[in-house]
Image (tube, helix red, strand yellow):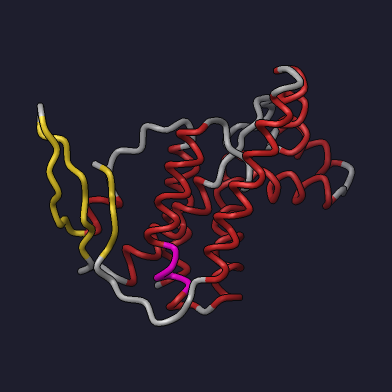
């Protein structure tokens, strides 16, 4: 199922949401430019600006707060593929404007970042000793999804639904769309973000 738009009205311009989407897009195009230099260059970039649990552990041992928080922040604006960024930004575009409308611009920005940090720290705690980098806005966006579920439980989403040999459009309850099985690589981060989003918005 592919969400198209929701039926929840908003009453302000979601400047922060637009900014987050644009920043993610710019960061991804920068990644593509690095990739032209070879996979080794891109791998080095991801290891430097993605979340690597062992790097965070070392930074904590040396009380290097910048080494702890900066990679988490930068990782929230990096993505691993076209499908990864399009999926994340599409969901953020549809649901983020309503959360910003409800919370206000600055509060929404804080909420988005906190959701991402909670998801990232949970990932680190459950993957101590791992040297595998993690990137993506999945945790932060899942926080937005959790908040949407709590704030607008009766909202409906126009959804493109495949039916064997053809496609059709259905208006589905938002909770069905928001709880689709997430098969992406960062589904666990998404679950942690949704929990944070639901609790923060309640």
Could you tell me which residue is drawn at 83 percent across and 52 percent down? 65
Left or right of residue 98, residue 177 in this image = left
Foreground pick, 125 / 9: 9
Percent x, y of residue 153: 25, 67
- What secondary structure is the stretch in magenta mostly built from? helix
Q: Residue furthest bottom?
A: 11
Is residue 172 positioned above or below 120 on the image? below
Point out residue 82 in the picture as x, y percentages from the top left corner. Answer: 50, 33
The answer to whether residue 124 is left or right of residue 154 is: right
34 is higher (above) or lower (below) than 198: above
Locate the C terminus and report the quarter of the image it occupies.
Answer: bottom left
| Viewport quadrant of the N terminus | top left
Q: Position of residue 88 (x, y in %)?
A: 46, 46
- Which residue sits at x=75%, y=17%? 40
The total of numbered circles placed on residues is: 0
Q: Is residue 130 visible?
A: yes
Quadrant of residue 10 within the rendered picture = bottom left
Against 20, is 56 above or below?
above
Seen from the viewer's position, the closer of residues 6 and 75 is: 6
Residue 125: name its quadrant: top right
Q: Which residues are magenta?
A: 96-100
Q: Position of residue 79 (x, y in %)?
A: 58, 37
Magenta region includes residue 184: no
Whether residue 121 can be seen here: no
Residue at left offset 35%, top offset 38%: 182
Q: Residue at x 30, y 52 (%)?
A: 178
In the rendered view, would you say 102 is above or below 50?
Answer: below
- Queried whether the magenta region covers residue 97, the answer comes back as yes
In this rendering, position of residue 140 left or right of residue 38: left
């Amino acid at each position: 199922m592919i969400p198209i738009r929701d039926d929840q009205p908003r009453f302000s311009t979601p400047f922060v949401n637009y900014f987050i989407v644009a920043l993610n897009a710019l960061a991804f195009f920068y990644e593509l430019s690095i990739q032209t230099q070879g996979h080794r260059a891109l791998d080095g970039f991801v290891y430097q600006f993605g979340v690597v649990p062992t790097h965070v552990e070392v930074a904590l041992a040396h009380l290097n707060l910048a080494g702890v928080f900066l990679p988490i922040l930068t990782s929230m604006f990096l993505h691993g593929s076209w499908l990864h960024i399009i999926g994340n930004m599409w969901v953020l575009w549809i649901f983020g404007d309503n959360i910003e409308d409800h919370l206000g611009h600055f509060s929404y920005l804080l909420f988005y970042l906190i959701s991402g940090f909670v998801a990232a720290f949970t990932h680190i705690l459950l993957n101590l000793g791992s040297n595998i980098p993690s990137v993506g806005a999945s945790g932060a966006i899942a926080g937005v999804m959790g908040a949407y579920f709590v704030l607008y439980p009766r909202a409906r989403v126009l959804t493109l639904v495949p039916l064997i040999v053809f496609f059709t459009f259905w208006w589905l309850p938002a909770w069905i769309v928001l709880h689709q099985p997430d098969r992406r690589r960062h589904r666990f981060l998404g679950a942690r973000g949704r929990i944070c989003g639901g609790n923060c918005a309640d």
